[in-house]
Image (cartoon, rainbow, N blue to C red):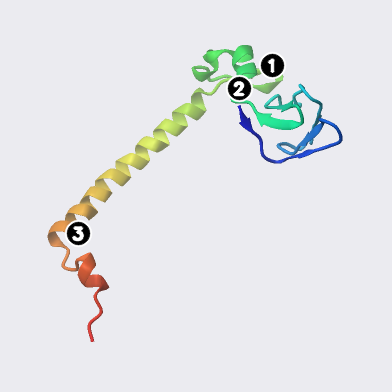
Amino acid sequence: MHRAMMWEKLNGDRVRCFLCSHHCKIPTGGRGICQVRENREGILYTLVIGAMPSLKHFGFGFLASQAWDPAFMEFGALSSVYGTLVSTAIGMLIAVPLSLVIALFLVTVGLVTPASALRVEH
């Protein structure tokens, strides 16, 4: 649990959260609508376990599920996880060889060394 940002203290121990558009007024010991922040004695904290309610409701099966139907409360993250992994792999396939070729060029063939490039001649 970490002390939250984007909030203000109200009268007494109540606080107003500005994390989302609801601008919840949270009493001591309470949580806002999003259930991610908690008021403890007039100080708003962000909960590290903010994802636990959704994990309890949907389980870890949402990582392997392709379903996405908000009307029936079915959510799956497989397409998002797959897309992230594929785009990362493509980026690495392009970046790693290219950076190695550039490094080899600068070390072996490059005529201008970094020191000579910075030297000013009159």
How would you rate the neighbour count of disc 1 (Cα within 10 Å): few for under 14, some for 14-19, many for 20 or more?
few
Q: Amino acid at mark 1?
A: Phe
Q: Residue beneath label 3, please?
A: 106
Foreground mark, 1 or 3, reads 3
Residue under label 2, please give it: 51
On screen, residue 72 versus residue 60, left or right, reads: right
- First in residue order: circle 2 vs circle 3: 2
Whether residue 22 is visible here, answered yes or no, is no
Residue 33, quarter of the rendered image = top right
Disc 2 or 1, which lies upstream in sequence? 2
Give the residue number, with chain letter if any, for mark 1: 72
Residue 19, numbered circle: none
Q: CA distance from mark 2 to mark 3?
A: 47 Å
- Left or right of residue 94: residue 109: left
Please state which amino acid type lies under the numbered disc 3: Leu
Q: Secondary structure at mark 2?
A: loop
Q: Looking at the rendering, which quadrant does residue 38 occupy? A: top right
- What residue is shown at x 82% (from left), y 31% (from top)? 14
Q: Residue furthest right?
A: 11
> In the image, residue 93 lies at what x, y percent?
30, 40
Q: Quadrant of the C terminus?
A: bottom left
Q: Gap between marks 2 and 1, in whole Å?
A: 20 Å
- The one nearer the camera, 12 or 80, is 12
Residue 20 is at least partly visible in this image: yes
In the image, residue 55 above or below residue 47: above
User: Which residue is found at the position 66% from the left and 35% from the top?
Assistant: 4
Which x, y percent locates residue 89? 36, 35
